[in-house]
Image (cartoon, grey):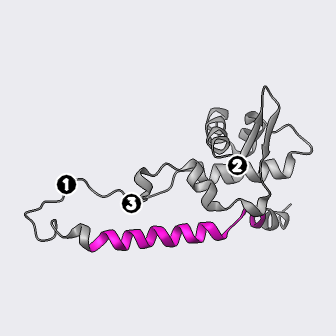
């Protein structure tokens, strides 16, 4: 399993907006130059972030801005905005285990709780990291 690149693209977007918004108009073309992906991908991620009220986008070429203090935006907020997980379940279970098989008929009983705990641990860790942490760490390299 691998989480899509939308999550890291979104983190990169926030870092760019915070770093450059006073000097540049933050457009999808500007962001695509830093992230090195097609501007259409950037616009799609920006749209998801806007839908979750994490980014505002001025009409025309007004550019993007962050809607909340960096300390208030967690990695979990961003993950939830850009990653689509069905039924709030990170792990997709195979559809029809064989009910006639001793393993197949019991696999959900054995794994469901464990997978839920793993997802909970990941979400907890994501909730502990904010964009302020990213800004602080990025300053070491700028």
The percent position of residue 45, horizontal first and vertical second, equals 63, 42
Distance between mark 3 and mark 1 Cα atoms = 15 Å
> Which residue occupies the extreme top position in the image?
60
Left or right of 58 in this view: 35: left
The percent position of residue 10, horizontal first and vertical second, equals 66, 49
**Element under label 3?**
loop
Q: Quadrant of residue 93?
A: bottom left
The percent position of residue 18, horizontal first and vertical second, equals 82, 52
What residue lies at 64% left-to-right and 49% top-to-bottom? 9
Q: Which mark is residue 96?
A: 1
Distance between mark 1 and mark 2 Cα atoms = 38 Å
Q: Can residue 131 be seen by looking at this rendering?
A: no
What residue lies at 64% left-to-right and 61% top-to-bottom? 75
Residue picked out by circle 2: 54
Residue picked out by circle 3: 91
Q: Quadrant of the C terminus?
A: bottom right
> Which residue occupies the extreme right position in the image?
23
First in sequence, mark 2 or 3: give its number: 2
Q: Residues within 10 Å of mark 1 (few under 14, many from 20)?
A: few
Q: What stretch of residues is rendered in magenta?
A: 110-134
Discs 3, 1 touching: Cβ within 8 Å: no
């Amino acid at each position: 399993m691998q989480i899509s690149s939308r999550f890291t693209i979104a983190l990169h977007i926030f870092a760019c907006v915070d770093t450059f918004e006073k000097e540049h108009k933050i457009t999808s073309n500007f962001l695509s130059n830093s992230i090195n992906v097609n501007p259409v991908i950037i616009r799609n991620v920006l749209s998801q972030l806007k839908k979750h009220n994490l980014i505002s986008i001025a009409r025309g070429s007004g550019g993007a801005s962050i809607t909340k203090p960096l300390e208030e935006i967690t990695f979990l907020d961003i993950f939830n905005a850009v990653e689509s997980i069905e039924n709030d379940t990170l792990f997709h279970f195979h559809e029809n285990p064989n009910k006639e098989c001793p393993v197949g008929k019991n696999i959900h009983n054995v794994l469901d709780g464990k997978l839920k705990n793993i997802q909970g641990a990941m979400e907890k860790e994501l909730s502990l990291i904010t964009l302020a942490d990213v800004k602080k760490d990025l300053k070491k390299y700028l």
